[in-house]
Amino acid sequence: MSTSSAEQKIRLPFILAVLVVVGIFVAAAVQYVRVVQTVKGEVRERLRSAAAVAAMQFHGEELEAIRSPADMEKPVYREYVERLGQIRREIPNIKYAYIMRRTEDPYTLKFVVDADSFVPEEEWDENGNGIIDPEEEPSYPGDPYDVSEVAAMQNEAFVQATVDEEVTYDQWGALISGYAPIRNSAGETVAILGLDMTAEDYVKIAKSAFSSILFLLFAVMTVLFGVSVVILTWKHRINTLREVDRERGALVGLALHQLGTPLAIFRWWMEIVKEKYGDLICKETDACKQLEEGIAQLQHVYNDLQQAHTVRNRRLSYSMERASLGSIITREAEVFSKKLEQKKQVVELEIPKDVIMQLDSKLIGAVVNELLENASAFSPPETTITISAQRRKHDAVVSVQDHGCGISEEDLPHLFKEFARGSEAYKFKPMGNGIGLFIAKNILEEAGGKIWVESKKGEGTTVSFSLPLSRKK
């Protein structure tokens, strides 16, 4: 045997071993990146949803009255501090909760309310060094805050619920922050809610994933590594989704409790004012009309939250009856026509008359109403909205088409999520809450159908849904 052939026989297994190790390392590195990105996305979505729901519990008009430390004695300030504290207790791992407003300097915000405003001084020393550092002192109304290095707080947080892109690290650990706008009754953003969540779990999972990679690299178990990562990711995602659902349910339940009693009081006093002072106040001023419109808006938000709470807790009752799909669509279009007249919009119906099927007339009517509401809100005046229906082999398909602003590609995947809104939705529908399409989707899925959307920004939107022609009770 020649020396060169012997060297080749020795070298070949070595090269193969190196290739196997490199292959395992590359596969492990790819899986590691996927795990980290998945966990990061879940943490960010969890925090974004929590901020969006929590922001709905504050009123822009009341925040306008809080400007300086002197306002800390006002009942509304103490109420909002307690409410921020309650939100922090309801959501695991929230370390700080606060509200800020804009200033003339785009890189400086001012504190309005802080959950730690009334924390005793002996509890200020968080890092335990025996000294009260400036960063450890609570923030008071009017205190400035530099946001030059926090991109989300410079603009996006005042438009929609958002989350910092990266985890930040300081002497108190790892934090990731979420924000949501707080608007007044006119839909104008007057402040933002901020929630800082500890991100140690995220860091631990990332380190754990890396440890698994090293183990699998030395054990040469590429297949088992892939399976373990999939199972780990799947289990973690399921647990995260359950936690998000629990948090959302708790916050929505809290919001319903806090809205219900004041709404009843407002309606009761509105009736008394109209009965006793109607001629003096209601006829000579717009006060009664404005109050009734405000109460109606609050009632609409309350009803949406209540319906979403019912859907989330799987208590939606879908009662089937034999009915005409065309009649339901026609009825909803007629009821909605008064609202359309205000914008000089019209509805064209292209529906067959012979689609008789088993469905819940009330719930399917509510879906059609929601789609009409959105089509009108996001379309300019003097435009046409078309509702069409067609019978197919196994189902019926209904489409609502408008010629409005359209939806960007980035927003389309999130339209049917709870509390999710398009990035520019506030321009056309400032009082929207991102619940309507979520409820519609759950109603249709309960009926055995589905819903989807086709849209191009600037050219209009078509939202369609299908219902099975026959379905067992």
Image (spheres, rainbow, N blue to C red):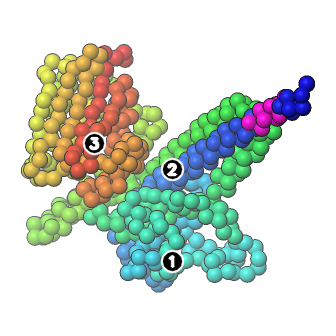
Q: Label 2, label 1: how many angstroms apart (C-alpha)?
A: 25 Å
Q: Label 1, label 3: how many angstroms apart (C-alpha)?
A: 39 Å
**Label 1 residue SS:** strand
In the rendered view, tell whether residue 54 sits above or below residue 150: above
Question: As shown in the figure, which amino acid type bears the numbered disc 2?
Answer: Glu
Main secondary-structure element of the magenta-colored stretch? helix
Mark 2 or 1, nearer chain start: 2
- Picture coordinates of residue 402 (x, y %)? 19, 43
What residue is disc 3 on? 455
Is any atom of residue 353 visible in this view? yes
What residue is disc 2 on? 45
- Picture coordinates of residue 207 (x, y %)? 72, 50
Magenta stretch: includes residue 14: yes
What range is drawn magenta here? Answer: 9-19
At a point 91% along the width and 24% down the height, the residue shown is 1
Q: Label for residue 146?
A: 1
Q: Nearer the viewer, residue 244 or 60?
A: 244
At a point 35% along the width and 55% down the height, the residue shown is 423
Q: Label for residue 405?
A: none
At a point 35% along the width and 64% down the height, the residue shown is 183
Q: Residues within 10 Å of mark 1 (few under 14, many from 20)?
A: some
Question: As shown in the figure, which amino acid type bears the numbered disc 3?
Answer: Ser
Mark 2 or 3, nearer chain start: 2
Q: Nearer the viewer, residue 365 or 426?
A: 426
**Label 3 residue SS:** strand
**Label 2 residue SS:** helix
